[in-house]
Amino acid sequence: MKYVGMHTQIQRNNILSIVLLMLFPLIILATIWGFLAILNYLTNTADTLDENGYTVNYLDVAYVNEQFVSTIPWVIGLVGIWFVIAYFANSSMVKQATGARSLSRRENPRVYNIVENLCMTCGMDMPKINVVDDPQLNAFASGISKNSYTVTVTTGLLDLLDDDELAGVIGHELTHIRNRDTRLLITSIIFVGIISTVMTLTMRMAYYMLLSGGGQRRDKDDRNNGAGLLVILIIGFICSAIAYFFTLLTRFAISRKREYMADAGGAELCGNPLALASALRKISGDPGLQHVNRDDIAQLYIIHPKNLSQGLMSMVNSLFSTHPRTEERIRILEQF
């Protein structure tokens, strides 16, 4: 199977990376404006009453815009600091989240020889090699630059696959690095993590206020202030949840075609499409990592565990999945 269109894929992923860098901050800013607008509408009442004698709420757009503009430098600053930290520490974060450790040549010359041979074949610099002590079958590439590019495999994968199958899997991951897929995914993970953290914090603060406020005697002003703060937190949580949903939708920008392209590149590098198909079939029997339940990390896996669910959940997961169905990937590989 001939792997074509590498430069086109690299260019496409570079463009998508720029789009994501612009889109995620816009989603965050839009969420903040929405939060300020809802808060303004709920707290502003007109001097006149409606026909039923109730107060009329209204939105002061000029005041909301004024508040919004004043928050922009803070938002950009905080998001920028978060992104810079995550950008330079992403490798250690992924390593810590998965429990991976560096694999030395002396410990496993088999893996090192396969990686070196494949890198020489395609003329790329050799990435770092990590291993996770886990019986499940998994492999993934990570990193955003030559200094952080890493291929990670599990001990379960090394034990079950033969050399040809392992070469196909590693070739798949090296193709992700060559195509800049990992840079695109890490960028997405960083921004989704920002909004997810804000949503979690507001939910926990609101939950804590409900627990701490129950059964306590307070004067009228304290109760009113507490209720007002609780409403603000609930509004903040709802806005963050909406923003989180839209950031998840941006995963559609991370085309499933990248997995087909990585399969093609891996098959070409190892010279044996059937070996990669066989490896995918074995991995599909027990993919993932036992102690890692984070979907952002699972985006990096060679097979997303959720893709193997059945029935209605399979249909739901397929709508938001960044991976195509494993059966289809195997079918395509076996045609060559």
Image (cartoon, rainbow, N blue to C red):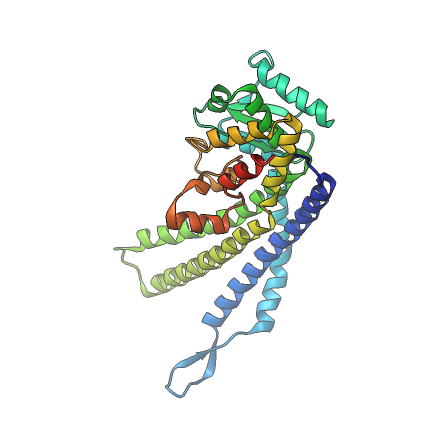
Direction from residue 217 to residue 83 in the image, left or right: right
Q: Position of residue 20 (x, y in %)?
A: 63, 50
Residue 66 location, x and y as percent? Answer: 62, 67
Q: Is residue 241 left or right of residue 16?
A: left
**Which residue extends farthest left?**
215
> Is residue 180 placed above or below 64 in the rendered structure?
above
Residue sitting farthest toward the front: 335
Q: Is residue 60 above or below residue 307?
A: below
Q: Would you say residue 124 is visible in this rendering?
A: no
Residue name at image x 37 percent, y 86 percent: 52
> Closest to the observer: 22 or 140?
140
Q: Nearer the viewer, residue 71 or 274?
A: 274
Q: Residue at x 37, y 60 (%)?
A: 226
Residue appearing at x 51%, y 32% in the figure: 280
- What is the quadrant of the C terminus in the image? top right
Q: Position of residue 178 (x, y in %)?
A: 68, 34
Q: Does residue 209 show up?
A: yes
Name the image quarter holding the N terminus: top right
Toward the bottom, the furthest residue is 51
Q: Residue at x 67, y 52 (%)?
A: 19
Q: Quadrant of residue 56?
A: bottom left
Tell me residue 146's x, y (percent): 69, 30
